[in-house]
Image (tube, grey):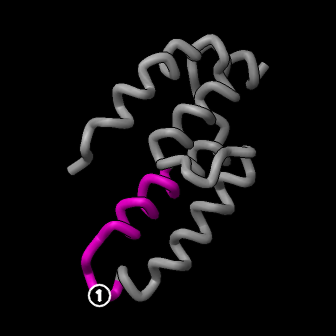
Amino acid sequence: MASQCQKHFNFFLIKPLIDVKTAKFLQKFSAAENYICHLFHKQADRQISKIRRAYDLKETSTAIHISAEINWIFFPQLNKLTDILPVFAIIPTV
């Protein structure tokens, strides 16, 4: 019953939700010019790689790609979002 509610109301499972939020945070963390962030840059990259491997994604996947792919895996009915992914990929983030 819980899986049906998740499917029909588009609720993520907890693990993928945490992975998406973590990937987004780590990508921003890696890009920061702060000295402390720079010290942990390689650890952040390793953690993002671990998330990519968990979902069998390319090593070049950005956080937005990770998010879109996880959406597609768990909510295939929403796969129309992946049709607009290239548009988002070229928009610079702030």
SS state under label 1: helix
The residue where tag 1 is placed is 35
Q: Residue at x 67, y 45 (%)?
A: 57
Q: Residue at x 25, y 44 (%)?
A: 92
Mark 1: amino acid: Tyr
Q: Position of residue 2 (x, y in %)?
A: 74, 24
Q: Is residue 55 magenta?
A: no
Q: Closer to the camera, 37 or 9?
A: 37
Q: Which residues are drawn in magenta? A: 21-36
Identify the residue at the far left of this view.
94
Q: Residue at x 41, y 88 (%)?
A: 39
Q: Position of residue 72 (x, y in %)?
A: 63, 25
Q: Main secondary structure of the magenta part?
A: helix
- Indicate whether 65 appears above or below 29: above
- Indicate whether 88 appears above or below 21: above
Identify the residue at the far right of this view.
1
Q: Is residue 30 magenta?
A: yes
Q: Position of residue 59 (x, y in %)?
A: 62, 54
Quadrant location of residue 85?
A: top left
- Indicate whether 41 appears above or below 68: below
Q: Is residue 64 left or right of residue 61?
A: left
Q: Position of residue 51 (x, y in %)?
A: 65, 56
